[in-house]
Image: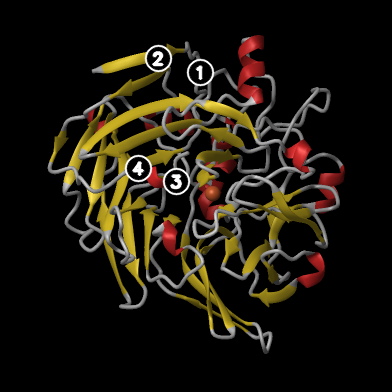
Amino acid sequence: MVTVKERFEIRIDSEENPLLEGGYAPIEEEIEAFDLSAEGDIPTDLSGAYVRNGPNPRYQPRGRYHMFDGDGMLHAARFENGSVSYRNRWIRTRGFEMEGEAGRAIWPGLMETPDRGLPVAWGSDHWLKDASNTDVIPFNGKLLTTFYQCGIPYIVDATSLDTVGPLDAEGLKIRQVSAHSRTDLATGELMFFDYDAKPPYMTYGVLNADGSLRCFSEIELPGARLPHDMAITPNYSILMDLSLFWNPDLLQRDIHKVEFHPDLPSRFAILPRHGGNADIRWFEVEPCYIYHVINSWEDGNEVVLDVCRMRTPEPGPEKTQQYAGSKYASLLAWASMDAQYYRYRFDMETGQTKEEIIDDEFIEFPTINQYFQGRESRRSYHAYIPQGEPLRMAGIVSYDTKAGTSEKYVYEQGVYASEPVFAPRDGAVQEDDGCVMTFVENMNEGGKTELHLFDPNNVTDGPFTRVAIPRRMPMGFHACWMPQSLTG
Ligand SMILES: [Fe+2]
């Protein structure tokens, strides 16, 4: 039975923005449903929830819409004793509430000009709405949602998906927090960073498992940067100074033009987990841009870092040409991601760096068994990104880097998958003991949405179980597995 908890009226003219239509179009209702029907067996030894964040805009945007502008909405499939329930909730951010009171969008989006007259704003240059729509991770018994370009994380109850409230950044005396700050499930600590258009250009800190502040440091950078992720090992944190950032001259005039600097080496800062700026060792690598880290670990004197590295950091004319005539040409070109599996090795003794491409397949939105974060791992799961169209997660690619093998399952055109997550079986020890799952929205069947479960050792054969989700669910961003054992 489907219970509608709350219904909102959404009236958005997509203005021919394909990222507001079809498989991306927002939904109006917050619902919950229990004992969902399934084709195939639902494992009885999975206890927790697959939670996915993503944009679900509520009001007509001020100007052109970018996916990062949409209000964050969580969708969760909860597994308990062999049955699955579903619910979805908007994250009640301050921006969401303020716009609700105003009955309209207040902040211009990422593709527009800043409105410096607004009383409050977020993001690395402080002019965006903090939509908290990008990432979701477990922390301190709850879920923590974060925003692409830095904001205040929101604490969300993992069972009800109700928003508890913002993290008390002011009380903790920290600045903002970027998406892809990372929780170490072994210690419960949260390693976080933010970046800013003005000095200090970056900050880094650690929250203890109970939410108190362990350490906080300003990080010196040569200018404003746009890092998207960080990595952790038990002893180190890795921060990024990459060769793609806002044109500094235009930034002085409040114009945000992202450019790749092919002559400027990219750099990784490796610092002790509880250290600060003074403890950093910098490692230079080939100029590049990276959205997402796969995993990182210590191997003798070396720190290994696996990432999805963009083949084309800045879309060239051939990509923009494809969308010529559309006022969204630039957005669509930037949204055509062509990242590939790439590995760095940083020698902490000699300061030497090695880097190599592992596979040339186009993959993004990487996940691993989260209990292996920071430890040597061999398995990862990625969304397959077909080229020649704007961002669509079109399937799953899994890797076993030790065996040097990969598997791939691709959905047909018109089908939108989500970031796949790995759910460990209760009490699992082995890295691959569990299952991989993704939400799948099929626009060829009117938006019929299912949750697909895959055997991590046999992704190619497709899902072994399909759970019916009683609503259409637009494509989103990041997801996590929230184990029941961590839910407080
Ligand atoms: Fe991301």
N-terminal of the pair, mark 2 or mark 3, is: 2
User: Toward which corner of the image does residue 434 lie, by quadrant?
Assistant: bottom left
Residue 371, position as x, y percentages in the image: 43, 60
Q: Secondary structure at mark 2?
A: strand
Foreground mark, 1 or 4, reads: 4
As drawn, 227 above or below 401 = above
- Mark 2, mark 4: which one is toward the viewer? 4
Q: Amino acid at mark 4?
A: Gly
Residue 146 is left or right of residue 24, and the answer is right
* Residue extending furthest toward the left: 40
The answer to the question of whether label 4 and label 3 lie on touching residues, with beta carbons closer than 8 A, is: yes
Q: Image height check: is 100 above or below 147?
A: above
Give percent across and percent down for residue 225.
Answer: 74, 55
Q: How many marks?
A: 4
Local crowd size for mark 4, using a 10 Å CA cut-off: few (<14), some (14–19), many (≥20): many
Relative placement, left or right, of 468 versus 325 is left
Task: Report which residue position mark 2 lands on.
Answer: 5
Q: Which mark is residue 48?
A: 4
Determine which residue is flagged by label 1.
13
